[in-house]
Amino acid sequence: MTDADWSMLMAAAQRGDAQAYRRALAEIAVWLKRYFSRRLPVSMVDDAVQDTLLAVHEKRHTYDPAKPFAPWLAAIARYKWIDRLRAMQKTEIPLCEDIAIPDHGNAVTAAHALERLLATLKPAQADAIRLVKLQGFSVEETSRRTGQTVSLVKVNIHRGLGRLSDLVKRGDDVD
């Protein structure tokens, strides 16, 4: 389906067309599965798709039918992807001597792909995104750590995420 088809289906769904909404969600799910399969470990793909579909459902009233649907969806998917990457970093598993050590290959691959994407940005943008979006620091804390003004931190995050979004949409992202 094209972006115009998605836009038309979502506009119909906003007007109460349940069949259009079911079709839109089914089509979106196929795209999301491809999107997350290239960015997350296999074990996390289905959950990421479901989280994103839920977010689309909860935020469907914010979609403006006068604008393209794909960028709106890609923004939601990107934020859900970043949430998953953050969760991967915060996961702590207590180890005992009688359990096998899990293979972290997929997590390492995902982290490496993210670092390669961030390396395409200006250093100030990458630093701001790492600190605020990945490590959870506030904009004010990031400002103090990097020496950038609060406004510049916000601008660098906005521009950096926009650049990453453009790279991903064009397919220039790192697999």
Image (cartoon, rainbow, N blue to C red):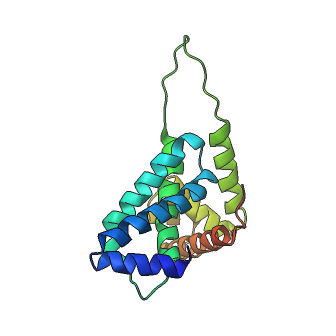
Residue at the bottom extreme of this rendering: 66
Residue at 38%, 83% in the rendered image: 64
Q: Is residue 145 visible?
A: no
Q: Is residue 92 visible?
A: yes
Q: Position of residue 13 (x, y in %)?
A: 33, 75
Q: How many marks?
A: 0
In front of the other: 117 or 70? 70
Q: Position of residue 76 (x, y in %)?
A: 46, 66
Residue 115: quadrant of the picture: bottom right
Quadrant in which the N terminus is drawn: bottom right
Q: Position of residue 85 (x, y in %)?
A: 54, 50
Residue at the front extreme of this rendering: 19
Residue at 52%, 63% in the rendered image: 78
Residue at the top extreme of this rendering: 98
Residue at 56%, 63% in the rendered image: 129
Q: Position of residue 167 (x, y in %)?
A: 67, 70
Position above or below: 82 against 18: above
Position above or below: 65 against 52: below
Residue at 48%, 32% in the rendered image: 92
Residue at the left extreme of this rendering: 16
In front of the other: 122 or 39? 39
In front of the other: 38 or 128? 38
Quadrant in which the C terminus is drawn: bottom right
The reply, left or right, for residue 105 in relation to residue 15 is right
